Amino acid sequence: MADRRPARIAALRDSLIAAHIDGLVITSLPNVRYLTGFSGSSALVLVTQRDLYFITDFRYDTQVGEEVGDLATIRIEQQSLWTGLWNLAGSLSGLEVVGFESSHLLHRDFQRLLTDGTRWQWRPQVNLVEALREKKDADEVALIRKAGEMAISALKKTLGEVRPGLTELNVAGILEKALRDQGSEDFPFATIVASGPRAALPHARASTRVIEHGDLLLVDFGAQYKGYCSDITRTVVIGPASEEQRAVYDIVQQANAMASKSVRAGMKGQDADGLARRYIEDRGYGDAFGHSLGHGLGLEVHEAPRLAKSVETLLGEGSVVTIEPGIYRPGWGGVRIEDDVHLAPGGPEILTDFTRELLEVA
Amino acid sequence: MADRRPARIAALRDSLIAAHIDGLVITSLPNVRYLTGFSGSSALVLVTQRDLYFITDFRYDTQVGEEVGDLATIRIEQQSLWTGLWNLAGSLSGLEVVGFESSHLLHRDFQRLLTDGTRWQWRPQVNLVEALREKKDADEVALIRKAGEMAISALKKTLGEVRPGLTELNVAGILEKALRDQGSEDFPFATIVASGPRAALPHARASTRVIEHGDLLLVDFGAQYKGYCSDITRTVVIGPASEEQRAVYDIVQQANAMASKSVRAGMKGQDADGLARRYIEDRGYGDAFGHSLGHGLGLEVHEAPRLAKSVETLLGEGSVVTIEPGIYRPGWGGVRIEDDVHLAPGGPEILTDFTRELLEVA
């Protein structure tokens, strides 16, 4: 793979000029990873037009050398990362107005800027790095596709082992073990395994509920590979589906297919959401689709853009988004079908290639 | 179990008086859970001397009723939680000075207070709820002990299956599946499985490294039960231990035992740290023990108090802390042995009862 980091840093430097700031302090770890390749959990980065400074602690001494290398001036701090920044500030000239990431700085740390960072004038910034991250390059799309393949392999194995009598937690365990065996380096979010009436809860996690014959079983989870996440949902029936289950499923399946086929870069977030929502509304289930259609994903499992009723922003070319319509009926259950879709110049490319037909398992 | 929430809220109200604030807006989800029992991921709580207001979104309509019930005035917000707070603010009288959690509020949200929350004067607060959480009651200690038992059962099963040829990720998968089968509702932190030279990295996660005969294998992980976390580390050898492995192990084992036996409420955090550190230093490995001895745990896997060189605060009675000395030698490997210890009035009670003798497995 080509080293994309210098181009990313150059693009960020253009954003600094547009924002009228001489430098930017980066505290978001996914943003740090995007710009420098560092995968650890402790870092503070200062970008200026001329320099890139990377501050971390002793635990990452070896790792920062391997991952960041010559890209930045690296400082290992014994005390706190902030102390490292103030020490650095004393040695830098020509820096007056410095930005910080308003969405990634706690108020407590903001107070440090005001008390210890008096050498600079501070300007809150939002989305400077996130805006760059929205457009994925070919390497990033390949990593998300790979994370999607890991998730699908794990799901196939799991569906082969699901049976009545297992708890939702047992199923989560089978799935997560299969993800690890596939090489998933982490779980991007807490695995959702929701069966029977619990499938009506859009944010159910796995519980001790015992899965029964006739249940809907909704599984929503992801894999992570070299930092990049996948996020996929399938809903199956334990045993033969009832007519009602099949009827609801078909609506969600159609809504998923229509949105995945028609979503385009350049569309408003709310229009993308409408692709699936209108279809579901027209069939009388509008109130039962209580969340938005999808979200961007990449180094984080929720990032820009958003596909939701209220969003007038345009979807950026090259972004990767989830398409996840659902219908939830309290007491009965729910169906959600979720794929990851790359908004390529030539149209949508689905990165999660696994059947969306209704599976009757066990 | 008795309902401890009213007493916790009463204690917080005393803290509000001491802090000269009329109310407190709580944005930390573990703090929300401690005070109200709510286990969801979207909540804003306002505590005053007279009232308790709970704001969440439509996804948690059912759940908030079940978990919070009559304890609070519940408001379901269609827009954002903050909109809910401002609507509420318009209807409340007698509130002038309101605190917010400085360590749990992003700068972006802090700006909302200044632009939309002008009805009140805002005061940053730290640790008001966290200070209450430090002292665990009998029910909380029982839950942490249960989470420890889950972790130990999972570890025993895993050590029975470890063998050369598996990757660290495979071992993580076996362990995490066993945790799920035990009923662990989540993973409190990313599982660490570090073998051979990687055991020298105190913050290694699981990797694709293949485990070899003769390796040290360090496993650091936890279970979660009804919100409460355990955190345990054991280090084993794959096959017969070398003399050098045994020598290093014995030092860590002794340091762990001395600290677990001697740690007491009322001790300074740095003196607790010294219990293990001095022993390791005296044997010439001071530089190889590069992190602090431990941290509190409960609803979060890292909470007050801290057991570290720089900490002069006293350990509170009733807190639960980790005791986790280690020796790390770059290129060679590392050993860490970690237990969870309750600082009971009568002395330390170890909650993680599993052998600390050097195990030679596979």
Image (spheres, coloured by chain):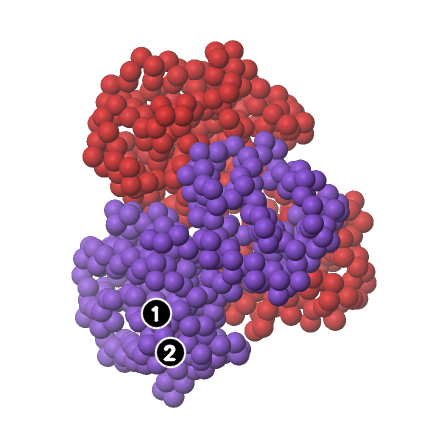
Chain colours: A purple, B red
Residue at horizontal 72 percent and vertical 52 percent from the top: A96
CB under 8 Å between discs 2 and 1: yes
Toward the viewer: A94 or A192? A94
Residue at horizontal 29 percent and vertical 41 percent from the top: B208
Label 2, label 1: how far apart the Cα atoms are: 9 Å
Helix, strand or loop for disc 1: strand
| Residue B329 seen in the figure | yes
Residue at horizontal 48 percent and vertical 79 percent from the top: A268
Q: In the rendered view, would you say A94 is above or below A13?
A: above
The picture quadrant where one finds residue A205 is bottom left
Q: Please name the residue that numbered disc 2 is placed on.
A: A263
The picture quadrant where one finds residue A82 is top right
| Residue type highlighted by circle 2 | Val
Toward the viewer: B280 or B342? B280
Residue at horizontal 31 percent and vertical 12 percent from the top: B243
Q: Chain of mark 1?
A: A
Residue A58's disc is none
Residue A135, image x and y in percent? 43, 66
Pick out the residue farthest to the bottom. Answer: A282
Crowding around mark 2 (Cα neighbors within 10 Å: few <14, some 14 to 19, many 20+) is: many
Toward the viewer: B1 or B22? B22
Q: Please name the residue that numbered disc 1 is placed on.
A: A341
Q: Is residue A210 left or right of residue B30?
A: left
| Residue type highlighted by circle 1 | Val
The picture quadrant where one finds residue B118 is bottom right
Residue A208, image x and y in percent? 35, 53
Q: Is residue A145 left or right of residue B21?
A: left
Q: Chain of mark 2?
A: A
